[in-house]
Image (cartoon, helix red, strand yellow):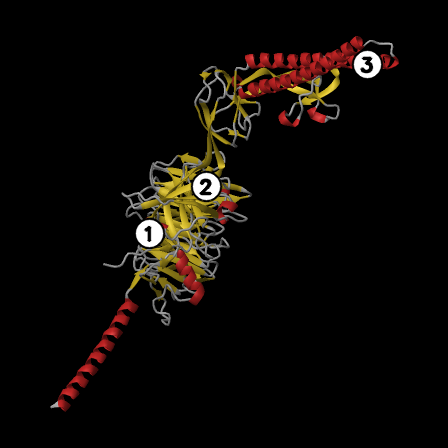
Amino acid sequence: MFRWAAVTVLFFGLGVVVLNAINKSTSQKAVATDELVFTSSTEDIVAQVGENKTNLVDGNPGNNQPKVDAPATVTVSRAGVNQPLVIANARISSMERQEIPAEKDGKLLFVGTDIKPNRDVHPDDVFKLTISRLVIEDEKVSGSDVILLDNKSNKKFRLWKGGEDPLTPGKLALDYKETTFYKLEVGDEVQKNQMVALVNPVLALDDLGIRAAKLEASEADRRASEKTRDEAHKRFQQQSLLRQKGAGSDEEYRSAELFWRRYIDEESGKAALVVQSQRELNAAVTTLKMHEIRSSIPGVIKTIYRNRGEAIKNLEPLLQVQNRDRLRVEGLVEVQDARTISRNTKVIVEPSQPEQPKLVLRGHLQEVTSIGVCLQGGVSTIISGSEDSSIRAWNPGTSEQLWALTLKHPVKSLACFSGKSSHVVAGLSDGSLVFFSPATIREKDAIKSSVSGHRGIVHSVAISPDGEYAVSAGEDHSLCVWKIASAELVQKFTDAHRSGITSVAFAGAAQIVSAGKDNSIRVWAFDAGKIDPSMLLSFDKRSGDVSHLGVSPDGKTILFDQGKEIRVLSLADKHLLGIIHCNSGGSSSFTNFAIYSPDGKTVLTNGGSDGKVQLWRTPVNNARPAELRQYIWTGGSSSCCAFCPDGSFAVTGTQDHQVLVWTLPNKREVEETLFGNIALNENFLDSNSRQVRIWVDLKNPGWLHPGGTATLVIPGAKVSVAPDK
């Protein structure tokens, strides 16, 4: 009986141990697999590519088939993500601003300065005024600092420098000088301690003259007392000698001593009066200066509250100056994320800079569907095609329309070549193409047309780097190769895609990249004017919203659209090099076009339904895809775009019939990343939003403006991630 009980207990114990082991193993597996999967940011992907070169495009690295799937995802543990904390819509403001007050009651003689503003000033805003200034005699002064007075022509003077110079009687004088002043306007720059206005100083000037005269009179009295003292001292010494010889009386001796000591005290009193007069003169100078309203900081005038001739009271603000050199960016961050941010942390600042078009070229009667730029002999010409069946040329320097070419069918696509001779190839809605050179457009037989080619719309045209061949892409799923010089069809490659082809581009001289409505990008070999039907690569699962996708100038990377993202893919190893995220609100995504600039450092995209064209820093070589410009046009969405070959400007065509010319940021702005330091991580929580403020201070590189917005990127911040539900 006892044995059976012992055996039962033994087996029961072993069962408990095995069950615990199974539960522990299951728990470990659950913990190991309890991870959050998300599409990684550019930095995470670039980091992984650099570390292990994992194929992020092809789902099966060992598969040799040309088909390539969309970019893969990266797993991150649920506890937290060691990725940059991105704070959008942070506000840029001036870190230093001043409401400049008046220090005296009175009437404003002017709101202006003696330094000419950096703008054209209307003659009515220029006026002259005679002002008084205190000068001091200095025989060592030279050059432009020398001031000569009419009544003291043999002496040299200079401006009295306040505390640096003594108020020496006999060395001071008042100089009256006629000075030219210029009216200040909002937006004018002012320097530190620059005069910006003057309150009527007539009484202060009179008081200054009185105090200066009083100082001279006090000094004259002191000199007279000094001489009287010295004379009394001599008489006292004579009486002392006579007394020693027994010739003088004690009464005369004491009287001489009394007068001598009296004049000593009198001279001391007169000297004190000189010091008092000096202090009063200094106070008069200070009072006069208080009528001059000066800015204590450098900056730009934001607001002017009073005008010339109006009254102003003591300590009442006259104008506001903002220092644009020192900026502060204020953002809101979730409280759980703010706890991981420390003060003085270095932060990346990515400003958002809206910009209006430099030029608006009007002439087309319907939507502008295609556009390009030819550069010949340093002169650029914009070529635009439209649904109104016309091709027009524009001078971007003068906004002048150079010529217009009327065709039988709407223009759907266009490509320009700039070299020793320039070429334009345009695709029409009926499947035909037009070939011509802008330089010889007015000559007889300058325009050549294709007879056969596509069946249906020609969506895109590309010209080879040597300018000899053109490749067209059509709605009929085909790619056609043309000899530009003769407009001859060299090859028609049918069924290049399963649907209409919307974009074609050269990737160097040996490859062609096409994008179709079948949501794929395909890469083909090109040699001696022929396309090899054997497809090299295929990138599938595009969203298909962007009809025209660009290839980098070096032919090494392509742009791949996927919803709210434009992805940069390598043609050599099929790796994902970076992602541009659409920052438009709602469900808006990229549309119409995404192309590289001529140097490949920026990408121009169309931002979707909000009609916003955006210029981005290309996200390669670990660079963040920062938005450099927001090109704003409210008339209609942009349907096509192009860069000038020398990178001097960009141009877009719109659905409301306009051709828009845009300025591009300079090289420093494109290549330089702005950094600031966190100056405040607020300890007070907004109970409604559960957010706290942070301040980031930075020096203005010259192109930022207070009042704008920016995105703050805090590298390596510990960002909380909500668990899956």
Q: CA distance from mark 1 to mark 2?
A: 52 Å
Residue 364 place in picture, x, y as percent: 37, 36
Work out which residue is located at the far right of the displayed protein and give it.
Answer: 245
Q: Tell me if 550 is positioned left or right of 8 in this view.
A: right
Residue 282 got which mark? none
Determine crowd level at label 1: few under 14, some 14-19, many 20+ residues with C-alpha closer than 10 A.
some
**Disc 3 versus disc 2: nearer the observer:** 3
Ranked by sequence position, the earlier of labels 1 and 3 is 3
Q: Nearer the viewer, residue 494 or 445?
A: 494
**Disc 1 versus disc 3: nearer the observer:** 3
Ranked by sequence position, the earlier of labels 1 and 2 is 1
> Which quarter of the rendered picture does the N terminus lie within?
bottom left
> Which quarter of the rendered picture does the C terminus lie within?
bottom left
Residue assigned mark 2: 382
Residue 336 got which mark? 1
Residue 497 place in picture, x, y as percent: 33, 60
Residue 608 place in picture, x, y as percent: 32, 45
Residue assigned mark 3: 234
Q: Tell me: residue 180, above or below residue 612.
A: above
Kind of residue at disc 3: Lys
User: Mark 3 falls on what kind of element?
Assistant: helix
User: Mark 1 falls on what kind of element?
Assistant: helix
Kind of residue at disc 1: Gln
Q: Tell me if 217 is positioned left or right of 340 in this view.
A: right
Q: CA distance from mark 1 to mark 3?
A: 91 Å
Q: CA distance from mark 3 to mark 2?
A: 101 Å
Kind of residue at disc 2: Ile
Q: Residue at x 45, y 18 (%)?
A: 313
**Do the CB atoms of the residues marked 3 and 2 lie less than 8 Å apart?**
no
